[in-house]
Image: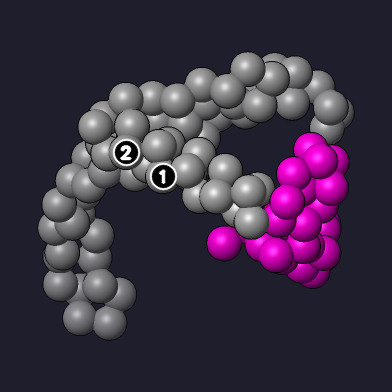
Amino acid sequence: MILIYTQRLQIIMNNKEFTSELADRLGYTTKDTTDLITSLLGQMTQELEKGNSISIQGFGAFEVKKKGEFISVNPVTNQRILFPPKLVLAYRPSNILKDKFK
C-alpha cells in the first residue's frame, strides 16, 4: 500500500488515488498501472531479499543492513534482555532529492 503524508501526518493520497494519478500522467489504464507497480515492487523485493541494493537515480538507494545484537534492561524487573541481530531495510535519499527539501 502506498500512502502519501503531509507534514501533519494526514493521508493526502492512498494507493488507489496514487495509482489513478500515475495512470493519468502516463496515459495508461489503471489496471496496467497497477500491474506495473506490483511488478516493480515485487522485483525490488526479490532483489532486496537476495541481499542486493537498489539505486534509483535522482531518488535514492535501498539496501538491507544487518543490525547487531544488543542488550537492553527491562526498567520494571531490571532483567537484562539480549536482542539478536536482525536484517533491516535502509533508505538513503539522493543528493538531488535532499536538495529539493532544503
The magenta span reads: 1-30
Callout 2 secondary element: helix
Image coordinates of residue 60 in percent, x first then y, are 59, 26
Disc 1: CA contacts within 10 A as few (<14), some (14-19) or many (>=20): few
- The image quarter in which residue 68 lies: top left
Mark 1 → mark 2, Cα distance in angstroms: 6 Å
Image coordinates of residue 24 in percent, x first then y, are 84, 47
Q: Is residue 9 visible?
A: no
Residue assigned mark 2: 46
Residue contact at pointers 1 and 2, CB within 8 angstroms: yes
Amino acid on which disc 1 is placed: Gly
Queried whether the magenta region covers residue 19, the answer comes back as: yes
Q: Nearer the viewer, residue 32 or 21?
A: 32
Whether 33 is drawn above or below 102: the answer is below
Whether 77 is drawn above or below 48: the answer is below
Residue assigned mark 1: 42
Identity of the residue drawn at 63% across and 49% down: 32
